[in-house]
Image: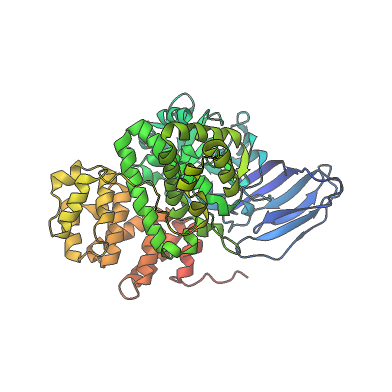
Amino acid sequence: MTHVALDLAVDFSAKRLAGTATLDLQARPGASEIILDDKGLEIAAITTPDGKPLAYAVGATDAILGAPLTIRIGAARKIVIRYKSAPESGALQWLSPEQTAGKKHPYLLSQGQAIENRSWIPTQDSPGVRQTWEAKIRVPAALTAVMSAPKAGEPVTRGESRTFSYKMNKPVAPYLIAIAVGDLAFRDLGPRTGVWTEPAMLDLAAAELADTEKMVAAAEALFGPYQWGRYDLLVLPPSFPFGGMENPTLTFLTPTFIAGDKSLTSLIAHELAHSWSGNLATNATWADFWLNEGMTTYATTRIVEAVYGPKVAAQQIALGIDAMNSAVTDNGGPSGADTRLHIDLKGRSPDDGLTDIAYEKGAAFLRTIELAVGRERFDVWLKGWFSRHMFQPVTTSIFLADLRQHLIKGEPALEAKLQLDRWVDQPGVPDNIAPADAQAFAQVDSAVTAFKSGKQPDAATWTSWTTDEKLRFLTRIDQRQPTKRLAALDQAFNLARAGNNEVRFAFLTLSVAARFDPAVPALEQFLLVQGRRKFVRPLITALAEDKTWGRPIAARVYAKARPLYHPVTTRDLDKLGLIAPAPLRP
Ligand code: BES
Ligand code: ZN
């Protein structure tokens, strides 16, 4: 499959996308069939472009992968699939007007990574495949459709509907095709950057994103020219399941990163960095996911250092190392198989690899290499890596071979020092890891020590701290606190209702562990106003696991909150058995 052309109508009342996907194929002479990925698509017909029907069969459904769609292509090298997505498509979320900021219009959003796009596009849905693509999307005339590609002409209004056209001329992996439809407005942030969001959110979003153009410039200086033309951002409704998603030319963002003080904008640096690590050089399989996320996490702190200075970067690295260590604990300790960078996903969902091992152990690996060879030499290699592998899939072994050829160049002492194979194939964290700067949080760390002996930071100290410093404090104090200590913290700093969502989440996590009743209304509200999986999944899971105190709260709140959450979030949370399964449809 080398090119996909979508021609789809967005039907909000049926919760379906319906139309055609036309696929260009490249095949061996004599090849007689193609197998596509299909998750719940309703296929009406598959034909050649001139309408000659092609035989096809949908195989047995696998709960994780969906079903193989086998098409007898004969001599055809272009095929037209007429289909509809199912209302329960795992990629798509259909929001009612009440679930948007404006309350007037419905909203559609998609999330393709890792293997969700097969629920709305019949495709070879592997990250090791690349295709160019284009789309014509018909929506109700009041709405705007945006996608992860440059627009191809102005929208055409005909009667009650408008058709938007997009075209991606660079080959991308299928998980990077994305769509959102809603009442959207746009504002420029810089010459090649801008923000899309609902009109009611535009001022807030644009203010928070004011550093975007600077970040693109910093990233180009580090990693080489930006290859995608524009870098725009879409700030979605709060049900968007991730912090951000690096859809090419149009990063998708949760609105929960808006803190009013740009303190959570390393998220933007992260999604922007994927324009190189991930979108140019793409993990060939989901077992190589650390190459996408570990490189991006490393690259994020480099951008943050360039834009916000070395102290902020050192602090974020230190927070990352704590997160890595927690991930090791959560994944079976230093000998746990899932603490390996190159993980084994046989028979499993790629979602199992979405841990801070990929992100933070991956980043630590790259920092370790940087420290060993020096920044100057490392940066030459890094730029070279992106230019050597742009628009290509990369595996862990391609990465190691490239390092050996272009960076280590046969220096035995360096090879021995780095322990490359140990880093990628073995569990746990090698002892040559580049350490966090022990002084990065010196002041906060003494406050943590003082807290242990009963002394709480005073208000002046707390308010003088940056968000990262507050997070260091809240994640470094004992995670099982007596309720009276949480009450004192909450009283002094209003943490259960903190305006900064990361700070609030950290405090609510402590509150659930301590069964701190006074925080329950704020907790409930937090779970009802946003659906970011990183926030809602751990909180609801921890509540559900506390059989006497927490579970009734989880059951009550999840029943109310579930309609707000994206399918990738409810899919996991439903497994907790908090609410009775929906009756089977007749
Ligand atoms: N590409 C990821 C999100 C993702 C990964 C979605 C795997 C589905 C499967 C994105 O770049 C990401 O890492 N988002 C983080 C942001 C953070 C680490 C700054 C998130 O959403 O929390
Ligand atoms: Zn990422």
Q: Residue at x 34, y 53 (%)?
A: 322
- Find residue 505 and report its horizontal and vertical position in percent: 32, 54
Towards the viewer: 35 or 22: 35
For this orientation, the residue located farthest to the bottom is 548
Towards the viewer: 579 or 447: 447
Towards the viewer: 96 or 168: 168
Image quadrant containing the N terminus:
top right
Give the quadrant of residue 159: top right
Give the quadrant of residue 188: top left
* Residue 315, placed above or below residue 332: above
Residue 567 seen in the current view: no
- Find residue 520 and report its horizontal and vertical position in percent: 28, 63
For this orientation, the residue located farthest to the front is 412
Q: Residue at x 74, y 44 (%)?
A: 23
Q: Is residue 151 left or right of residue 182?
A: right
Colour scheme:
rainbow
Towards the viewer: 449 or 399: 399
Image quadrant containing the C terminus:
bottom right
- Find residue 35 and report its horizontal and vertical position in percent: 74, 54
- Find residue 503 and report its horizontal and vertical position in percent: 29, 50
* Residue 544, placed above or below residue 536: below
Q: Residue at x 34, y 39 (%)?
A: 313
Residue 334 seen in the current view: yes
* Residue 573, placed above or below residue 31: below
For this orientation, the residue located farthest to the top is 191
Q: Is residue 223 left or right of residue 432?
A: right
